[in-house]
Image (spheres, rainbow, N blue to C red):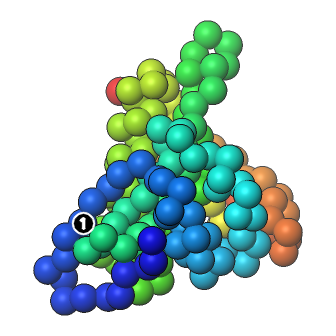
Amino acid sequence: MTTAAPNDGTDDRAIRPAARGDLLAVYRIEKKSFPQPWPFAAFEGFLGEPGFLVATVDGGVVGYVVADTVPNAGRTLGHVKDIAVHPDYRGRGIGAQLLGSALTVMREKRASRVKLEVRESNDSAIRLYRRFGFQFRRTLPRYYDDGEDAYVLVSELQ
């Protein structure tokens, strides 16, 4: 599946589980979005996982989220591992739709808390996460290969 072209806002949007045919579009979005992109094989490894979702507009993949849950000391914890929207589609609420859908999946998997890491310079992502109830937990110094710090944000799921 290819990445859709921008349109006038009368688009047909959907959030659905990622399929093998989406991987090239997902990988292209990853490369456009991050200075140190995940390898293609990482996305292949998440195929079939309930928290690997894509956003489509008029049938083309324009964003994705990778999230999972793990048992931890008698609780289930969620982790948003990766989320991105094609640059041409940012600011249209697609990231919020993806994050909301991922949180729904993690609630269904009985996660009581969700965490994520975000670049300290990624103000738009931090604003999005705060709208969803994520709060600052700590800083991970030099977390990224280029030396930038990451913030760990956590949200308690109800």
Is any part of residue 106 visible from this angle? Answer: yes
In the figure, residue 103 lies in which quadrant?
A: top left
The residue positioned 85% from the left and 69% from the top of the image is: 145
On the image, the x and y values in percent for residue 54 come to 43, 58
Q: Quadrant of the N terminus?
A: bottom left
Q: Secondary structure at mark 1?
A: strand
Task: Specify the farthest residue to the left.
Answer: 10
The amino acid beneath tag 1 is Arg
Q: Is residue 157 left or right of residue 119?
A: left
Q: Quadrant of the C terminus?
A: top left
Q: Is residue 6 left or right of residue 129?
A: left
On the image, the x and y values in percent for residue 41 come to 73, 57
Provide the residue designation for mark 1: 13
Residue 145 or 58: which is nearer the viewer?
Answer: 58
112 relative to 131, above or below = above
Q: Is residue 81 left or right of residue 50?
A: right
Residue 101 or 20: which is nearer the viewer?
Answer: 20
